[in-house]
Amino acid sequence: MLIEIDFQSEEALYMQLRNQIILGIATSMIREGDPLPSVRQLAGDIGINMHTVNKAYSVLRQEGFVTIDRRKGAIVAVDANKLQAAEETKQQLRVILAKAICKNLSCDEVCDMVAEIYDEYGDYGKQEDN
């Protein structure tokens, strides 16, 4: 698992780590059921404090991306509650879209960006409609 942390960024390290893991799941580099590295191992590999990794894993657990087992560690387990995930995404999009509006981006420009990013993830997450 390749994690890229920008130590010059103003974004908190644990959020960068969380985001990198979510991107890994979205691009199928990390799959459902995969174990994440131990807190100690990942902290050592990327040169950050173990508490920072632990905080990232805790956030991922709260958000339904991983389960945490004392013996097995953190395991990717994407939350199956689609309605809850849709509502959380909608709330996050409200802020993102407000920023886009403040920067005078048109709806078409934003839609094009969303389509471009979604296409980067290929068929991951696409399911047949019932």
Image (cartoon, rainbow, N blue to C red):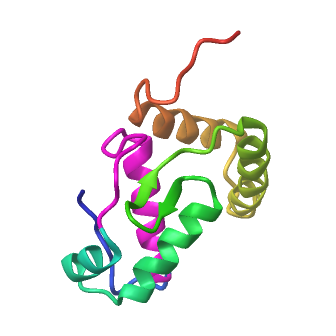
Residue 10: percent from the left, percent from the top?
Answer: 48, 85
Is 111 or 130 nearer to us in this picture? 130
Q: Which residues are magenta?
A: 12-37
Task: Find the residue positioned furthest to the left.
Answer: 45
Is 10 or 38 nearer to us in this picture? 38
Find residue 26 and report its image quarter: top left
What residue is rendered at 55% in x and 44% in y?
A: 78
Q: Is residue 78 left or right of residue 120?
A: right
Query: Considering only vertical position in the picture, is 72 above or below 117?
Result: below
Residue 34: percent from the left, percent from the top?
Answer: 35, 47
- Please check the rendered image and state whether residue 78 is part of the magenta-colored stretch, yes or no: no
Q: Is residue 119 left or right of residue 127?
A: left
- Please check the rendered image and state whether residue 13 is part of the magenta-colored stretch, yes or no: yes
Q: Is residue 87 left or right of residue 110?
A: right
What residue is rendered at 49% in x and 73% in y?
A: 56
What residue is rendered at 28% in x and 68% in y?
A: 4
